[in-house]
Amino acid sequence: MRLLNKIIFTFFLLFSTFSFAEISFVQRVLVEKSDTAGVDNDGFFGNGVAFNDDGSKMFVVFNASNTQTYSHVSEYNLSTPFDISTSIFAGDNEKCRLNTNDETTGPVSRVYGLKFSNDGRKLFVGRGALTNGADHDRIFGFELSSPFDVSTCSFSDNQTSGLDSAALQNGSNAGDIASLGHNKVTLQGFDISKDGTKLFAIFHSRLDASPNTRLLEYTMSTAFDLTTISLVTSGGIELEDETKNPNGLVFSPDGTRLWTLDHQDDSADVTQISLNVAYSTNSFTIDGTVDIEDLNGIDSFDEPRGITFSTSGLKMYVGTDQNNPGDDGGEHMNEIDLICPFNIVSSASCKSYTSKGRTGVAEAQAELAKRTITLSTNSALNRLKWIRRNKDKDDLSNQNIKINFSNSLLSSLKQLPISSFKKVSTNQKKNNSDKKYFHWTEGSVSIGRTGDTKISTPKKFEVSSLSFGFDKLTDKKGIYGYVFRYGNDHIDVGTFGSEVDAETLNFTYYSSTPMQNNKQYIDKIFGIGKIKSDILTVVDSKKFTADRNGNQIYGTLKIKDEIKKNTFTFIPSAQFDIGHTILDGYEETGQGNGAYIVDDQHVRTKNLRAALAAVQDLSNDKYTVKRHGKIEYQVDIDRSSNFNYKLLDAKEVVGSETLHSGSLHNINGELGLDIVLPDKYSLFIIYERNQAINSGHTDNIHIAFGYLPYEGAEYAFTINGSENLLSKLEFKKNVDGLNLSFNVKDDITNLGDNREANIVLNKVF
């Protein structure tokens, strides 16, 4: 059957024309050399390349040309992610020396391949056979005390047993190769699955009469523990016709595709293979082979060494050694653009892949929508809480009545109920439209971050907003009102320039209704909003921009109770939030391949909250001061949204990601202070901390300013007194724009001589 497959494949190659997926050469850079004796890159071959996840560092493993020098891994810093033209050699002190010139403790020469664990704390290299003796084909593991800092490497005695043994080379679907003899079959590339339980090694036979290349599959019973390796006999791929002399092996992040690199002096072939099951060579399809020898037009891809991809799959990197025509005698790294992520063959399916940076931008937009609803709702709830905290002030200023006594004899009048002051009846009909609203404003600043996850980069955000509100009391001691909120959001996604800037506008209706004894309340919120976003996405050093609009609707129901204990008031509450945001689709613009067409995105909000608040009254005769706090547990029961997209350059490719924004469990805390001034102005300040368990946090500062409009009242009066017992009683009324006032002044110590009464009618023009 295997022979038949070979015949069919060969026939297809001869009589069919492949239309390969579009790839294009971008640039090449000379790998930085050093001048330090014993570790000079001059005379070394770069046999493997790797990047950290965000593309800020590139690593090259150098194979020593003889046993008297050190094989090592060099580190390069990239100022622009995955742009190798911005790479700077980190220096001799930032290298990982792979041995101490002892073949038993590490690879001295013939080093092939370079691999890091996902967390960057483990480094792996391979060594090919040197002599006719056994046990030279090995893979070595090194520990890094600091992630992706190769200068902190140390050999951990984590290594395979000899891969050239019969137990590890014979019995798979690829065929037996151990019998060919040592130094006739050599390890020349490897890769490890993301979870560290699978290892793949590619071997080259130097016997013309035998198959040249075989890919073998292994398992590790303990993740990343090379000592627990065993051969998978149901796997393996014979690559006799595709890869004559391999020098590189790499898998896609999802494990469904792999590539081998052919190190020939007359060709530079990259073979692509698709697997039916991730990280399983039991069933596969050879998609095709692409010759990149003349990709840059100067025939400088002879004898390529090492291959890898960017995290997005839109860039491929291939090393070339110092023997290339026109080279300056040094090792080079070459950057190649791809139209389809992780695909170089047009006959193969162009799959959808998304990077952590891409996912981070998508999540940032979903989090923006949910955060806007929360902040708009909180703005209205903060106003209702302030009203309830200050509804029973002793100076009665909430009722447009002011009593201010500075002497002890008259201060007892403060205890008089409002009903003691009888309203003077008039013949003028009362017009309910003349009842003015209370006006208030609130400014808030929110800062926060969400951490790095398996699918998303970290995000930092800043939100500033200004709210304008107005409300009025009802006849049943309730209140209702409206608030307009304008917000400005800035979100930094990752560390290389991706960001989301947004303007938000929300209109919210709020009301509070007493249920019993004016101590239990039901708060209701209903609002609508609009979001306008500017999106900048940086992928592999390419910048893509887009505009996106969104509309949202939301509501909240809150039940709370008041329990008074001396100067303290305890307020337990339960709350349910619901909301729905529809973010419009958009098409990215920018230079180069990799732009997205994004579909409409639906972001839902469903929160359950339970809280306990406390208020302490610190008021005096002049000022009303109250401090308050809250602790709240929140369950976000609907955190998912679908992010659906297409590739602009390959619209048939459809991708979908299910995002999980925020955290299921959240703890919120709040501290605040209310101040009501004697001249009709009020101020409150609130600091709020929202802690998402294992996800991130938000810090909010709210500053609200309120004004009690006496001039709009139907009437108001003041009673003033001083220590000399000079008192004044004054009534005021506005009649059709005219201010009518009547006052009586009395000196209790001299009633007969010092008494005054005035009637004043005036109008302000």
Image (cartoon, grey):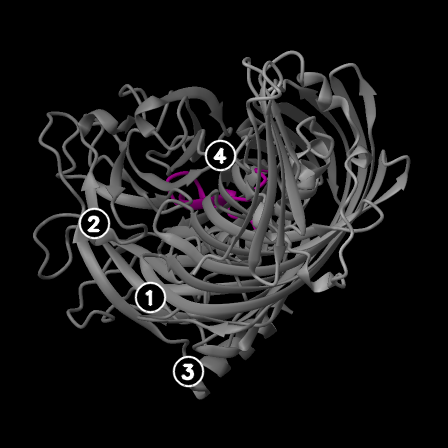
In the rendered structure, which segment of residues is drawn in magenta?
176-197
Q: Which kind of residue does numbered mark 1 sit on?
A: Asp
For marks 2 and 4, give the CA distance.
24 Å
Nearer to us of marks 2 and 1 is 2
Between 475 and 359, the residue placed more toward the observer is 475
Q: Secondary structure at mark 2?
A: helix
Q: Which kind of residue does numbered mark 4 sit on?
A: Asp
Q: Is residue 117 visible?
A: yes
Q: Local crowd at mark 2 within 10 Å, few (<14), some, or many (≥20)?
A: some
Split into 4 quadrants, where in the image is the N terminus? bottom right
Q: Is residue 274 magenta?
A: no
Nearer to us of marks 1 and 3 is 1
Q: Which kind of residue does numbered mark 3 sit on?
A: Ser
643 with respect to 703 (left or right): right
Between 303 and 306, the residue placed more toward the observer is 306
Q: Which tag, 4 or 1, sits closer to the chain's start? A: 4
Q: Local crowd at mark 4 within 10 Å, few (<14), some, or many (≥20)?
A: few
Which residue matches tag 1? Answer: 337
Return the residue found at the far front.
752
For marks 4 and 1, give the CA distance.
27 Å
Q: Which tag, 2 or 4, sits closer to the chain's start? A: 2
What numbered label is drawn on residue 119? Answer: 4
Q: Local crowd at mark 1 within 10 Å, few (<14), some, or many (≥20)?
A: many
Q: Is residue 187 above or below residue 37?
A: below
> Where does the image place residue 319, in percent across and percent down from the top left?
27, 53
For marks 2 and 1, give the CA distance.
17 Å
Q: Which kind of residue does numbered mark 2 sit on?
A: Thr
422 with respect to 176 (left or right): right
> Where does the image place residue 612, in percent across and percent down from the top left?
76, 27
Between 654 and 139, the residue placed more toward the observer is 654
For marks 1 and 3, give the CA distance.
17 Å
> Where does the image place residue 135, in percent across and percent down from the top left?
45, 30
